[in-house]
Image (cartoon, grey):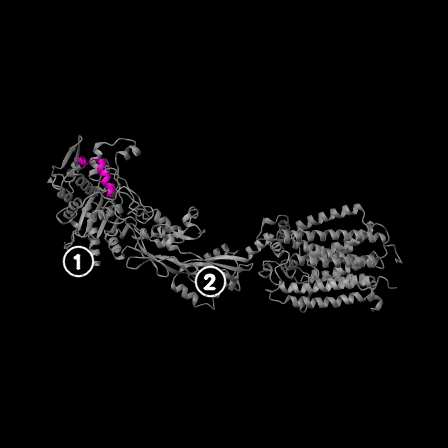
Amino acid sequence: MKIYDDLKPLESRLAVLEVVLGIFFGILVGAFWVLQVLRNDYYCALSEENRIRESLIAAPRGLILDRNHRVLVENRPSFSIVLVRENMRDLGAALEKVRRIPFLDINTVLARLHKYRSLPPFMPIVIKEDVGPAEVAFVEARRLELPELAVKVEFKRYYRTGGGSAHILGYVSEISERQLALPAYHGLGPGDLIGQAGIERRYDSILRGTDGKSREVVNSKGRKITELERVEPAAGRTIVLSVDTDLMDSLESAMSGKVGSGVVLDTRTGEVLAMVSLPGYDPNSITGHCSQQDWVSIVSNPDHPLQNRAINNLYSPGSVFKLTVAIGALEEGVITPSTTVFCPGSATIYGHTFHCWKAGGHGSMNLRSAITNSCNVYFYQVGKKLGIEKIAQYAKALGFGSATGIDLPGEEGGLVPDPDWKKRVRGTAWYAGETISIAIGQGSLLVSPMQMAYHAALIASSGRTFKPHLLHSYYDTNRQVFPSEPGEGVRALAVAEPAFDVVRDGMWGVVNQGGTGGRAAIPGMDVCGKTGTVQLASKANIKNPQAPKRDLQVHSWFIGFAPRQKPEVAIAVFIEHGGAGGEAAAPVAKAVLETYFELHDRSKASS
Amino acid sequence: MIDRKLLVNLDWILLLTVVLLSVIGVLLVASASQNLSANYAQRQAAWTGIGIVLMLIAMSIDYHRLTDRAAVLYLPVMGLLVYLLIFGRTISGAKSWIVVGPIRIQPSELAKIVLALMLAKIFAEFRMTTASTREVLVVGLIAGVPFLLTAAQPDLGTAATLVPIAGCALMLAGLRARWFVAMGLLVVVVCLVAWIFLLKDYQRARVVSFISPGTDPRGSGYHSIQSRIAVGSGGVYGRGYRKGSQSSLEFLPARHTDFVFSVLAEEEGFLGTTGVLVLYAVLILRGLRAARHARDREGLYLAACLTTLIAFHIIINVGMVAGLLPITGIPLPFLSYGGSFTVTMFISIGLILNVRMRRTVN
């Protein structure tokens, strides 16, 4: 058919072209086979990952109330001003408008814009946090002129405290790497806020609630198209604490300007009615996303305001410990209430002279007057007879040497020394003179103010009180109430009622019969108590002129309870470097107990 | 002008294939442009209509009359390309378009047709078994001028599509081994020069991300990855028309133009992709058959060059969608949205049909 030409060579070249193109098509079909048939599952998963976004809906944290349901911790709205870039026609013009707004800093705005430049334009950028009502009104009133600005509301933890109750409440901040690994925080992620101290930490799981979830379809720019599924957040439960705000305020104001701690317990239930540690701090300044400056100022304070002195710090009990020795000696039959010792101002025991605090001596003392006057010589002799093993046994039974179990994190257990302990820890033998020091509360004994308050409550209740606790109850959004379970209450004390009676009688004398604690006396009220004064400086230290004057001052203790019959309330007050216990700590106890009785309308009650 | 004898040799299969592809194209553009403001499907339908009219015109004029006047057609197009470089308005970063009222015309598309006509004319009387230096230089000059003018716009993608047209002509003419080596070297040199002087940063990034896609998954590797996700998630049967999430949620880039085949793959699955590839294979086979059965060398060269052009578009574009080739701005015949390009493809088909129709006349 080829009329003009022989096109055969061309036809064979066309055939080559056809084969080459055929191979390419084969490769393409093979590629789609691999992608669409063999690897379909893999790409489907990637496609879902693209399409579906899970976002959390934060659950509001539970409130914390006092025993009268007054708010201690709540969530308050915090307003931020945000820049919405998708409403911005022209960047230059918008920045010019922003520049003219007095409370916005243009450099901050530019820095934030740069930092978050990769966010999609519909996502707002925060340009100023925590603005006041005036700024909110300014922006809200200018929606038309300033479409690029908006106000964003977030909820922030707010603590109502002057600082002294900060330690009970604690604070919240972002969960740390280490905490994320703990089973208690299972299900939380980076950036989540958790309680980091106090009740916020101890009862985090009650307060935290469960975040809600939203599964939504998003487009390539991250904008939500539709919501597939929504799980509403479950708000955290509200906690009712046993503390009484009025009593807390009274304790804090009575101790204002001082460094120390006070604890008030209900002797019948073990409930903590008040607990203060000074200096305090403002939890609002470190909660959430704390500023570096606030944190440094708290951490660098030499008085360590973050420490809860009521449970974290340990001190020598001083003369308060004489009560333990007295109860032990009575119970063991070493002495009777009428056992008399003559105090000449000092005693020589085991070849060493031990002094009484009163230079001229107290003269003839029985147990009751020895407690009332806190006579050292009497208790040197009693302690010597009782022996260190028994002293340690009764100290442990009366609340010392182990944590009380208060529902706060980080409670210290203190120390009740005995020969075993000394050999184990110090590697040396006990020497007899140590027992004499221990008998008046010096030596290696270490106790916390919390333990001292519990000790007072145990004496007041003849050993029949509950474990100290702050949690009164908590309830969920349906108002279902969960009361606290204070656990095993009564300590198995092998101490009979008469021993307590005698000691309580002595404690009444301390306050009401010219004893060391007279400043705690409230007319018409039967306050019982015991003072303690902790010697700090060795003789060498006193002679050292370089030593800071405050550090030479003795620590001041007062523990007590009231009323004498049917006690209701026990108290321990500790003031660092406060001077003699009767001078510094006793008046604080008096003020607080007065407040307690005013609150309970018992001003005329008497024995 | 069209008598009955011509209609006897009309390639109905090719015609039907093209119409089918065009319909699929309009539907895909409609699905791909769901969230876009303009109605691209309507526009593409309009361009298809114009394309069909121009195809009919291209069919009806005896191709000899066109090849005889190849130079008369070639020179004005070159003039337009020069005009663009001097007076052209920069749109989307390139001086590629002549704006006439609401319509934008891309003269570089017309260069493909006139180049094929020129080559057909040159080789019409060429009867040697292999091409000599003279032929290579002539082809190089005729293809080189529009190539450089288009590359300078800059539109390297469209310029590159001129290379297979010239390559096809030279291959048919017969190339000696040394010329293959020389051209291979030339390609290397051109690539190097392009890499250093011509390519923009984003183009270099595309090549880098093709060689190693993990380098920058949110950046230039992103489009390639998103296209593969669309294709792979389509599976065998696809996710259903207008139901592809990669496409409708805007994860796919350029989904109504360069990546329209990804939309097909996601929504119609492996059946859809192989189905359309079969249609393309039919189109190419019919084009090559038109060349093989051509009455003379002019017809053979013309049909073969244009078929190669179409095949090049298909392979480069689909290869890119499948992640086998780097991202280039080369659209897919009859499926991608684009006025000048669609029209050019229809004219090419018209000329191929033209050659086929006149195999036995006179």
Point out residue A555 in the picture as x, y percentages from the top left corner.
Answer: 23, 44
Residue at the spot x=19%, y=44% of the render?
Answer: A496
Q: Is residue B7 above or below residue B199?
A: below
Q: Which residues are magenta?
A: A383-398
Q: Quadrant of residue B88?
A: bottom right
Q: Quadrant of residue A108?
A: bottom left
Q: Which amino acid, mark 2?
A: Val
Q: Which residue is mark 2?
A: A98
> In the image, which is nearer the foreground, mark 1 or mark 2?
1
Residue at the spot x=72%, y=53% of the render?
Answer: A25
Is residue A385 part of the magenta span, yes or no? yes
Q: Nearer the viewer, residue B96 or A337?
A: A337
Q: Which amino acid, mark 1?
A: Ser
Q: Which residue is mark 1?
A: A603
The mark total stands at 2
Of the image marks 1 and 2, the number of the one nearer the N terminus: 2
Is residue B120 part of the magenta span, yes or no? no
Write down the chain letter for disc 1: A
What is the quadrant of the C terminus of chain A in the image?
bottom left
- Of all residues, the one furthest to the right in this rendering is A3
Q: Is residue A325 above or below residue A429?
A: below
